């Protein structure tokens, strides 16, 4: 296959990258789940016929590495799809991430030959299971968390299959909304397919094939060029999830050598009895996320980027569990901790490039009433870095979902939002201070089933280079009589009308000793870094 | 004499019309004191009867955070609303990301004990004493303006009004969210209101300076200002936040009016200057608006024309990245030092340098600015680029042109296909200093068959402001299931809007009978967050219209299960001012090209005739390649295209 000249490559790059962006815009505009339409918890991508990622418009880093596994599973199960077909999957052990993330995969063809796939993934508000929102505070098998869909043909010759729809009608809490969301997903893929075929029609099949090779080569060579500039070395670190009883360790060894970026999780805890297990696709996403942050921003994210990344993830552990382990918080909580531990290891190899720890959680809160569920994730502090303070009240690392406006929440659900404000004093002190977390108070206007999945309630986000730790998060229930009870990081319980849920989210760690003053012109050097303070747990 | 001016970064365009016809020219902008270029121009003009103006003064004040010291007041529990925003970080893969700085400092954000329910009923009343105490305190801390945004004020503004009165008694300017945008989503409403308060003093003094200059020159007591949503209104009738994107809106308004006169319903406007290219779509004689407008990361939820800006202009720098790809922009050499060929010390190759070496631009007649282009400098810059890209000089020249075109294609796709508009059925209207050079190539890539180059293409935004209708916009959130009751509510709101419009028109000295009212209902399926605008009429089956529009846009409709909701009622009132005829080309004498030039094309060098636009005749018709030089721009017609002279002095390129 001929490699394209630099001009054609650039021209085609713009044309092809625009396709998943356009799919995403369509999906958000037609979706029903607040997760998709307000919080933008969705991603769209194109793959070639060999299942290699060509282009991705991602809004949520946790989808980064997870889509290729889904395409791989579909290609293996359905080698003979036809034009107009789409396959559905959410099984975390077949390329899914957690059950609410539903992926639709549409092959596209040119003169009978498979040329690739248009794919989108979106977080649905509810996929059944034992609690509303399908994000239970505690669960020990996948089957408690909702319907598990292995790769299944959902659209055959442009028609949705009744059998699949029936599963949603029977097993989920708001089937009308589900079917609306699925329609939006099918529509987005259909658009992606038609744009790809238009491209081949206009420029030819050979041009398309050459483009795929060229763009993967291009990203690969840019990544290799950048990795080669980083200092060689190896470093280890561990960090912990709070755990329901005992802390759960995640251990990593990072090796930077030439163009190779190797990450070895040997020593990480065995898979959990709870739902903190992160399927391998989620673990991969977290590793890719960290790599992306280290790379120049303009490298197109595709298969070529990750070819020199090597991940060792022992089977049966927290970061590569085996079925039927429960996984619902692996995607949202464990993924954050994987990033934290990778950054801890990298800070010794890449002084002054790595920030202090951010809030390290997504503070998942789901509320359920009969036939209605509301789900949100709450912002916290970003870690400070050598160049600036950490941002306050933002989503960190593996997510970037937006708030649902108070005026939308209260118009739709029996909730009154009493307060959303900066949690003063929650950021770690430092020459650059960590970002502040948030205090959020929700008054229940009707009895509700509450599910909480949150972390950093025991071990605070750490400062770096002498900066202070942030404050831990805290979940409270204020009774009707005004007394406050502290809630565990993970729980599902029934709360009463008139009670208030109060979530204080963690801040971010500080950077540099708080009481020093150095010229802003000087780049602070790593000798101020004190591994002893930043490796300890409190 | 009617006058319009449009302030740009480098030049201020002036267009006038009187009994002798339309005339346009450029004067140098005065960025340090933006009204100076305008007031100086006004002094040189005889008897101004009507003055219209587009300005970037509010945008610049916002970008540079030079505005009033604003105090922000909101409902108890939400004082950090402007800082928490929608809790998103601006970039995903950046450890150092810094959020956009709100226009109010955190110590000037205040909350008051009051609460409304989603339907506007009072849960906790706002006490007069609380309001008065807060107002005193805000006066004491030295605020210069106040922005008020309370929850659900779009349903019931009573509490906001109570606060406003307290501040008015203390003579401090107030911006109230229920007046500026009475629509749901508290953060976006608060942001818009705070920005209005922030830019108000600067806009006010700027407006006053120009008003005085017009009066001193014997002109009328008020003048028209271009709004971000298109159309003009008298400076006394616009909210400061409404003029934020005043400049680019002029070109779109011009496109709209020209499209009507040329009987082209579906247009893509394409304005390419020195640093950026702006695109917008006009569908069925209606420009597209966006509800997601933002400047510098801060949302602004007033009607804003949906203009996509791409960092691609004549000054955009071409470079080779680490992976060996040829890239263009978004960095621009601007006007200082400018492209290499400006010979002002800029050594980097730009789009203008490539256009010069390809023979499309003439070194001697560039933009009518007095700048002579230096081909040797351009050649040095491009040769150096060619070496690092490992291409020949000619491949590099063509490469820069096609890469900048590819960047712009992405802009057009965002404007059209991502909004469900098929570009192939549209006419591309190209203007600005560099637009008419690239238009035909862009059209070819997109399958667009027709390109129009308007008269005065180099200063078309000013012409658009001159021609623009007077526009009033009203909107109010409703969010109710579509049924008879809702329809009655919609009718009541529309009646109120119409009365407001009539009062405003009377104040502007305009006749209500010349006004065209367009009522629009934003609708969606119950449960969705994004709506589609549906033209409203009492007689139509609105739910059915919505299903149809949804299907057209997304390829399917959900007619069975979900219910349809009315989200926001809008009314725009367009009143035309006296119609101005565009000059027709009268000469029928067939002329000769002024010269011939060698032009570099993908197929090799070709000889192309060069004409001057003012020497063209009414039956002018030619095959590409042709170059036409105009005041302030150059038109390039590639081979396999045809160019002809049309009515209204428009040039039409038929793309083969």
Image (cartoon, coloured by chain):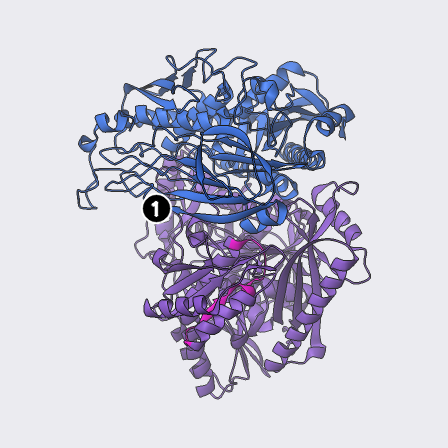
Magenta-drawn segment: B170-186
- Residue A289, x across and y down, in percent: 43, 29
* The C terminus of chain A sits in image quarter: top left
The image shows residue B494, relative to residue A453, as above or below, that is below
Image quadrant holding the N terminus of chain A, namely top right
**Residue A411 versus residue A139 in the image, above or below:** below
Q: Quadrant of residue A344?
A: top left
Percent position (x, y) of residue B493?
69, 66
Compared with B291, A349 (above or below) is above
Q: Residues within 10 Å of mark 1 (few under 14, many from 20)?
A: few
Q: Is residue A169 left or right of residue B253?
A: right
Is residue B181 magenta-colored?
A: yes
How many numbered discs? 1
Residue in the image at 52% along x and 66% along y: B160
Element class at badge 1:
loop
Residue B223: image x %, image y %? 52, 78
Q: Mark 1 falls within which chain?
A: A
What residue is shown with label 1?
A: A424
Specify whether B392 is left or right of A117: left
Please name the color used to draw chain B: purple
Magenta stretch encompasses residue A503: no
Identified at 75% across, 53% down, the residue is B482
Q: Left or right? Give the position of B260 relative to B294.
A: right
Which residue is situated farthest in the front direction here? A481
* Residue B82 seen in render: yes
Chain letter for the blue part: A
The x, y position of residue B358, in whole percent, is 47, 49
Can see residue B596? no
Side of B138 relative to B607 (left or right): left
């Amino acid at each position: 296959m001929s490699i394209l000249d630099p001009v054609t490559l650039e021209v085609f790059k713009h044309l092809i990258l625009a396709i998943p962006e356009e799919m995403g815009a369509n999906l958000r505009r037609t979706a029903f789940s607040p997760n998709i339409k307000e919080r933008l918890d969705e991603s769209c991508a194109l793959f070639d016929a060999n299942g290699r990622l060509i282009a991705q418009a991602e809004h949520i880093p946790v989808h980064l590495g997870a889509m290729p596994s889904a395409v791989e599973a579909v290609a293996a199960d359905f080698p003979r799809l036809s034009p107009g077909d789409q396959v559905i999957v959410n099984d975390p052990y077949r390329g899914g991430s957690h059950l609410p993330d539903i992926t639709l995969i549409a092959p596209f063809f040119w003169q009978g030959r498979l040329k690739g796939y248009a794919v989108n993934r979106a977080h649905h508000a509810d996929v059944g299971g034992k609690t509303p929102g399908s994000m239970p505070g505690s669960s020990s098998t996948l089957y408690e968390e909702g319907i598990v869909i292995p790769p299944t043909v959902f659209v055959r010759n442009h028609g949705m299959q009744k059998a699949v729809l029936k599963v949603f009608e029977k097993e989920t809490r708001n089937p009308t909304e589900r079917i609306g969301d699925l329609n939006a997903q099918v529509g987005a893929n259909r658009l992606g397919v038609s744009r790809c075929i238009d491209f081949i029609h206009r420029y030819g099949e050979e041009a398309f094939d050459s483009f795929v090779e060229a763009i993967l080569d291009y990203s690969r060579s840019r990544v290799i060029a950048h990795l080669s500039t980083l200092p060689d070395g190896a470093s280890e670190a561990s960090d912990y999830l709070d755990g329901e009883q005992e802390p759960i360790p995640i251990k990593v060894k990072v090796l930077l050598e030439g163009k190779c970026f190797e990450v070895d999780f040997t020593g990480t805890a065995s898979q959990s009895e709870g739902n903190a297990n992160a399927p391998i696709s989620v673990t991969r996403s977290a590793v890719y996320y960290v790599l992306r942050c280290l790379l120049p921003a303009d490298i197109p994210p595709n298969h070529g980027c990750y070819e020199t990344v090597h991940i060792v993830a022992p089977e049966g552990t927290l970061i590569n569990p085996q079925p039927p382990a429960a996984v619902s918080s692996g995607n949202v909580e464990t993924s954050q901790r994987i990033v934290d531990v990778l950054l801890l290891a990298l800070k010794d190899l890449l002084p002054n490039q790595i920030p202090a720890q951010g809030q390290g959680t997504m503070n998942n809160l789901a509320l359920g009433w009969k036939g209605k569920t509301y789900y949100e994730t709450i912002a916290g502090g970003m870690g400070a870095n050598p160049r600036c303070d950490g941002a306050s009240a933002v989503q960190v690392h593996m997510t970037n979902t937006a708030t649902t406006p108070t005026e939308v929440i209260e118009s739709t659900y029996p909730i009154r939002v009493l307060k959303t404000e900066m949690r003063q004093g929650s950021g770690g002190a430092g020459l650059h201070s960590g970002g502040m977390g948030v205090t959020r108070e929700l008054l229940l206007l009707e009895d509700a089933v509450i599910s909480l999945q949150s972390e950093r309630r025991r071990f605070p986000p750490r400062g770096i280079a002498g900066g202070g730790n942030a404050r831990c998060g805290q979940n409270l229930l204020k009774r009707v009589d005004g007394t406050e009870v502290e809630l565990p990081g993970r729980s599902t319980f029934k709360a009463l009308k008139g009670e208030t849920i109060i979530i204080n989210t963690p801040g971010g760690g500080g950077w540099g000793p708080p009481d020093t003053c150095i010229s802003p012109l000087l780049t602070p050097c790593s000798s101020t870094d004190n591994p002893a303070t930043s490796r300890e747990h409190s | 004499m009617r006058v319009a001016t449009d302030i740009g970064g480098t030049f201020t365009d002036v267009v006038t019309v009187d009994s002798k016809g339309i005339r346009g020219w450029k004067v140098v902008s005065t960025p340090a004191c933006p009204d100076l270029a305008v007031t100086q121009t006004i002094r040189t003009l005889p008897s101004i009867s009507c003055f219209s103006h587009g300005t970037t003064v509010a945008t610049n004040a916002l970008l540079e955070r030079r505005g009033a010291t604003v105090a922000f007041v909101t409902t108890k529990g939400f004082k950090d609303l402007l800082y928490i925003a929608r809790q998103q970080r601006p970039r995903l893969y950046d450890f150092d990301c810094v959020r956009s700085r709100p226009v109010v400092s955190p110590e000037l954000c205040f909350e008051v004990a009051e609460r409304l329910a989603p339907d506007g009923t009072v849960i906790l009343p706002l006490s007069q004493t609380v309001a008065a105490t807060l107002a005193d305190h805000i006066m004491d801390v030295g605020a210069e303006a106040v922005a008020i945004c309370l929850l659900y004020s779009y349903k019931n503004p009573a509490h906001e009004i109570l606060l406003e009165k307290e501040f008015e008694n203390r003579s401090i300017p107030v911006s109230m969210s229920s007046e500026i945008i009475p629509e749901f989503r508290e953060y976006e409403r608060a942001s818009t209101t705070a920005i209005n308060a922030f830019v108000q003093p600067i806009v006010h003094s700027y407006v006053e300076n120009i008003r005085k200059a017009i009066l001193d020159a014997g002109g009328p007591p008020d003048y028209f200002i271009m709004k971000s949503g298109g159309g003009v209104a008298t400076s006394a009738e616009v909210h400061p936040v409404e003029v934020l994107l005043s400049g680019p809106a002029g070109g779109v308004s011009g496109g709209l009016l020209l499209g009507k006169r040329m009987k082209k319903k579906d247009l893509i406007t394409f304005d390419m200057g020195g640093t950026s290219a702006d695109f917008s779509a006009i569908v069925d004689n209606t420009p597209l608006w966006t509800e997601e407008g933002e400047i510098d990361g801060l949302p602004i939820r007033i009607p804003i024309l949906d203009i996509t800006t791409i960092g691609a202009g004549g000054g955009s720098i071409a470079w080779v990245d680490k992976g060996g790809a040829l890239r263009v922009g978004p960095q621009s050499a601007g006007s200082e030092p400018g492209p290499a060929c400006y010979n002002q010390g800029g050594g980097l190759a730009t789009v203008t340098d490539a256009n010069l070496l390809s023979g499309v631009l003439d070194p001697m007649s560039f933009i009518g600015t007095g700048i002579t282009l230096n081909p040797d400098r351009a050649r040095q810059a491009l040769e150096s680029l060619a070496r690092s890209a490992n291409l020949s000089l000619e491949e590099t020249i063509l490469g820069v042109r096609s890469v900048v075109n590819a960047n712009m294609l992405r802009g057009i796709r965002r404007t059209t296909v991502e909004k469900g508009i098929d570009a192939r059925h549209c006419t591309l209207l190209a203007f600005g200093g560099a637009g008419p050079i690239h238009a035909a190539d862009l059209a070819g890539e997109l399958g667009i068959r027709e390109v129009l180059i308007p008269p005065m293409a180099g200063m078309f935004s000013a012409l658009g402001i001159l021609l623009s209708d007077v526009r009033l916009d009203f909107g109010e959130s409703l969010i109710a299931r579509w049924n008879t009751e809702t329809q009655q509510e919609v009718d009541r709101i529309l009646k109120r809007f119409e009365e407001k419009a009539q009062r405003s028109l009377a104040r502007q000295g305009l006749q209500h009978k010349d006004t065209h009212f367009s009522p629009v209902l934003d609708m969606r399926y119950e449960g969705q967050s994004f709506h589609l605008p549906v033209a409203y009429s009492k007689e139509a089956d609105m739910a059915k219209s919505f299903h149809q529009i949804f299907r057209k846009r997304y390829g399917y409709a959900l007619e069975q299960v979900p219910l349809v909701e009315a989200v926001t009622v809008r009314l725009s009132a367009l009143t035309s001012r006296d119609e101005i005829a565009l000059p027709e080309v009268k000469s029928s004498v067939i002329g000769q090209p002024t010269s011939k030039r060698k032009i570099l094309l993908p197929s090799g060098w070709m000889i192309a005739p060069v004409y001057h636009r003012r020497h063209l005749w009414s039956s002018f018709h030619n095959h590409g390649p042709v170059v036409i030089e105009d005041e302030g721009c150059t038109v390039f017609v590639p081979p396999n295209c045809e160019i002809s002279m049309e009515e209204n002095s428009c040039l039409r390129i038929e793309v083969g």
